Amino acid sequence: MKRTKFSESQIIKILKEYESGVSVEELSRKHGFYPSTLYDWKKKYGGSTDSTLQELKELKRENEELKKMYANISLEHIALKDFIAKKL
């Protein structure tokens, strides 16, 4: 996946500048991105705030931990099933 040179909080600040009335061309020149990129960001991050993004990151991290826990438990379950089947 391609990494962007702007963090999510920087993108939100740029979008706030755009909403305050600064033109797309001026923003793209000032920050060094293509004007079409702004519309992609607007589609992806429109209406987001820093706290919303922080909460989303926290939820993603928690989701990853839960997936790992589930994977470990399911492996243990399979191992125990095999062990019991071999004993019988």
Image (tube, rainbow, N blue to C red):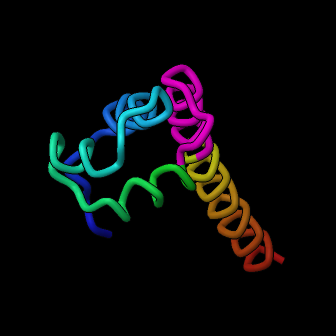
In the image, taking residue 66 as reference, residue 33 lies left or right, namely left
Q: Is residue 67 above or below residue 31?
A: below
Q: Which of the pair 84/47 is nearer the observer? A: 47
Across and down, in percent, residue 21 comes to 44, 31
Q: Which of the pair 83/14 is nearer the observer? A: 14
**Is residue 20 highlighted in magenta?**
no
Residue ranking furthest to the top: 51
Predominant SS along the magenta part:
helix
Query: On the rendered image, what quadrant is the N terminus found in?
Result: bottom left
Across and down, in percent, residue 85 comes to 79, 78
Quarter of the view holding residue 10: top left
Q: Residue at x 71, y 63 (%)?
A: 80
Query: How many numbered marks does the figure carry?
Result: 0
Quarter of the view holding residue 49: top right
Q: Residue at x 24, y 43 (%)?
A: 26
Q: Which residues are magenta?
A: 45-63
Q: Which of the pair 75/24 is nearer the observer? A: 24
Q: Residue at x 46, y 60 (%)?
A: 40
Residue ranking furthest to the right: 88
Q: Is residue 78 above or below residue 85?
A: above
Across and down, in percent, residue 60 comes to 56, 42
Quarter of the view holding residue 9: top left
In the image, taking residue 15 as reference, residue 28 lies left or right, namely left
Query: On the rendered image, what quadrant is the C terminus found in?
Result: bottom right
Across and down, in percent, residue 46 comes to 58, 42
